[in-house]
Amino acid sequence: MKALAAWFCVAAIYPAAAVAQTRLITAVPAPDSAAGTAPYEVLLTFDQAVDPTQSTIAVTAGGGDSETSGPVHTEARFPARLGVPLKPLQPGKYRVDWSTVGEDGRKSAGSFMFSVTQ
């Protein structure tokens, strides 16, 4: 019981430390969006700095073919943003699967779909 009370005290003082996990804030293209023009890269912005060496972004077409054309990257000016270049995309649906490790050391992952209409 004392341990539980101590945990609640720590959580009250350091709430971010108690529940911190890297969260995806924005994505370009946006989840469930329909792009008239094919994007040339996927950009993901998180709520904290992320480690590109421990991050992956996979973009696949309906048949499971990879549509990325290079490695995951970030910029020193935007350490909370990851990007990956894409091959020229044809009209269709695409799936983005990502994983990363935030500055808090915790791994996060997610996925979303987008489509290209032209």
Image (cartoon, rainbow, N blue to C red):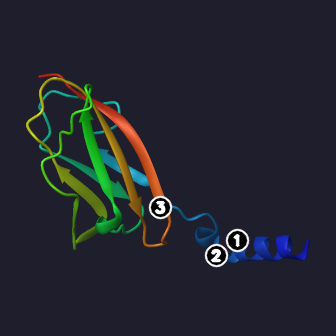
Comparing marks 2 and 3, which lies closer to the viewer? 3
User: Residue pushed farthest right?
Assistant: 1
Q: Which mark is residue 93?
A: none
- Name the element at disc 2: loop
Mark 3–mark 1 Cα distance, whole angstroms, equals 20 Å
Image coordinates of residue 70 in percent, x first then y, are 14, 53
- Name the element at disc 1: helix
Picture mark count: 3
Task: Verify CB contact (< 8 Å) between mark 2 and mark 1.
Answer: yes
Question: Quick one: label 2, few (<14), some, or many (20+) residues within 10 Å?
Answer: few
What residue type is disc 3 on? Lys
Where, quadrant-wise, is the C terminus in this rendering?
top left
* Quadrant position of residue 94: top left
Image coordinates of residue 112 in percent, x first then y, are 37, 37
**Disc 3 marks which residue?**
107
Q: Which mark is residue 14?
A: 2
* Quadrant position of residue 33: top left
Which residue does the image show at 72% across and 77% down from the upper left? 10
Which residue does the image show at 12% across and 48% down from the upper left? 69
Looking at the image, tell me whether mark 2 or mark 3 is earlier in sequence order: 2
Which residue does the image show at 18% across and 57% down from the upper left? 71
Q: Which mark is residue 11?
A: 1
| Horizontal side, residue 21 vs residue 14: left or right | left
What residue type is disc 2 on? Tyr
Image coordinates of residue 74 in percent, x first then y, are 23, 65
Image coordinates of residue 39 in percent, x first then y, are 14, 39
